[in-house]
Amino acid sequence: MKIIEKKVENVDEVRGLLTEKQSADYLNVSYETLRKNIRPKKKISFVRISNSVRYKLSDLDAYIESCRVEAVN
């Protein structure tokens, strides 16, 4: 979890908005996977600010939870 341990370097991080690179790191997927497979299918909500895409940490966590597969007993 490099994102949490890192010092806050910009206002977006304070607001819980992560860049695409940070979001990919958080999800433990490549930047390309996020851009090509996840984002175009709108599996995770995102914020578009001008030409920049940002992800809310809470939306990333919701996506992770939506991928959860329950164990069968």
Image (spheres, rainbow, N blue to C red):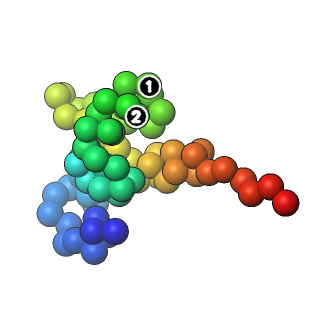
Q: Position of residue 42 (x, y in %)?
A: 44, 28
Q: On the image, which quarter does residue 28 sit in?
A: bottom left
**Relative side of 37 to 30, left or right:** right
- On-image quarter of the C terminus: bottom right
Residue at 45% across / 37% down in the picture? Answer: 44
Pointer 1 local density, CA inside 10 Å: few below 14, some 14–19, many at least 20: few
Name the residue at 66% across, 50% down: 69
x, y percentage for residue 38?
40, 34
Instruction: Report how far apart the C-alphas of labels 1 and 2 lie in the structure.
Output: 6 Å
Identify the disc placed on residue 38: 2
Asked whether the viewer can see residue 50, the reply is yes
Report the quarter where the N terminus lies. bottom left
Q: Are marks 1 and 2 in contact (CB under 8 Å)?
A: yes
| Residue for point 27% across, 68% down | 2
Residue on which the image places disc 1: 41
Which residue type carries mark 2? Ile
Disc on res. 8: none
